[in-house]
Image: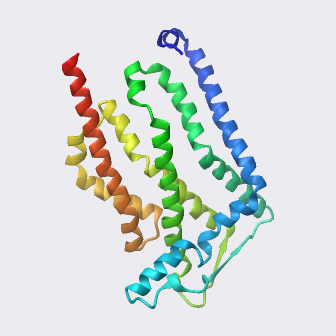
């Protein structure tokens, strides 16, 4: 769509255009969710992977603990001291439906992002569209890396800590299926969005709302925010929070570099203008 045509579109025309982009995005989520619903065995074998001690993360941490001479560790246990149960009539069906929807959103994320970008990009200048090439690929890649990090790192650490935490030996852990899925969902999707930080900083810098000097100046405050964020999406133990905080701090440093590149390119264009 040409820029002239975009300028001539009325407010209602923009709303109609947005509606169709949203319809296509929701349709893609629905299709992916339907496939996830059909292949429930595959989905739930993956979802409940971190509840079994043969999960790759636990095996790796167990080997690392043995290498360091830490014999008394929960990562090397034969099984978790809890059971997963369903306490409501429609509990398993609801878990099946909602898990399929979340899986559908994750799988269709690149297409959803493409629809959002298709609505926004016609209003940009040709040079801005050119400089933003690869946005969908990079943003999707960061999101999927974040989801994998949440699933293979944050989720196992959370489940391992909470499963072995007891205030009394008289109290046994019997987790509801919705609670287990909530941990997997929040850890994975939240990590996916956190890993979009470089993309967010890129656009904030393009809009003139953020500068590399600003990011460097408030690095200490960013560290505090990162630790708070790590405490929210991880169990309340220092080791888990540090493990989660490290990649976020790396992403923040990468974001500073990206912001500096954007500012440098903008200054270069102003000199040649």
Tell me the colour scheme of the image. rainbow
Q: Nearer the viewer, residue 147 or 165?
A: 147
- Above or below 28: residue 150: below
Residue at horizontal 42%, vertical 70%? Answer: 240
Position in image of residue 182 (x %, y %): 60, 61
Position in image of residue 1 (x %, y %): 54, 16
- Above or below 145: residue 203: above
- Above or below 121: residue 241: below
Q: Nearer the viewer, residue 192 or 174?
A: 192
* Quarter of the rendering containing residue 269: top left
Residue at horizontal 79%, vertical 61%? Answer: 90
Q: Is residue 267 left or right of residue 243?
A: left
Q: Is residue 220 left or right of residue 130?
A: left
Residue 51 appearing in the image: yes
Q: Nearer the viewer, residue 146 or 221?
A: 146
Q: Is residue 169 left or right of residue 273?
A: right
Residue at horizontal 43%, vertical 71%? Answer: 236
Position in image of residue 105 (x %, y %): 62, 46
* Quarter of the rendering containing residue 244: bottom left
Quarter placement of the C terminus: top left
């Amino acid at each position: 769509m040409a820029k002239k045509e975009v300028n001539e579109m009325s407010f209602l025309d923009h709303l109609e255009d947005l509606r169709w982009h949203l319809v296509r995005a929701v349709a893609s989520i629905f299709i992916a969710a339907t496939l996830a619903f059909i292949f429930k065995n595959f989905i739930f074998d993956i979802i409940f992977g971190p509840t079994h001690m043969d999960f790759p993360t636990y095996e790796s941490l167990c080997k690392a603990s043995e290498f360091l001479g830490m014999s008394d560790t929960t990562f090397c246990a034969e099984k978790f001291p809890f059971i997963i149960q369903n306490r409501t009539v429609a509990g398993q069906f609801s878990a099946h439906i909602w898990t399929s929807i979340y899986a559908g959103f994750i799988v269709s994320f690149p297409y959803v992002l493409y629809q959002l970008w298709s609505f926004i990009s016609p209003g940009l200048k040709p040079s801005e569209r050119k400089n933003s090439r690869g946005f969908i690929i990079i943003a999707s890649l960061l999101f999927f890396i974040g989801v994998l990090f949440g699933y293979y790192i944050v989720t196992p650490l959370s489940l391992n800590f909470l499963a072995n935490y007891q205030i009394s030996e008289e109290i046994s852990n019997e987790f509801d299926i919705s609670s287990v899925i909530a941990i997997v969902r929040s850890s994975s999707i939240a990590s996916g969005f956190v890993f979009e930080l470089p993309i967010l900083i890129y656009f904030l810098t393009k809009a003139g709302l953020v500068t590399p000097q600003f990011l460097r100046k408030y690095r200490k405050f960013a560290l505090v925010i990162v630790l708070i964020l790590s405490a929210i999406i991880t169990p309340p133990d220092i080791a888990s929070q540090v493990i989660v905080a490290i990649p976020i701090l790396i992403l923040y440093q990468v974001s500073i570099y990206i912001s500096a590149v954007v500012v440098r390119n903008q200054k270069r264009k102003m000199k040649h203008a």
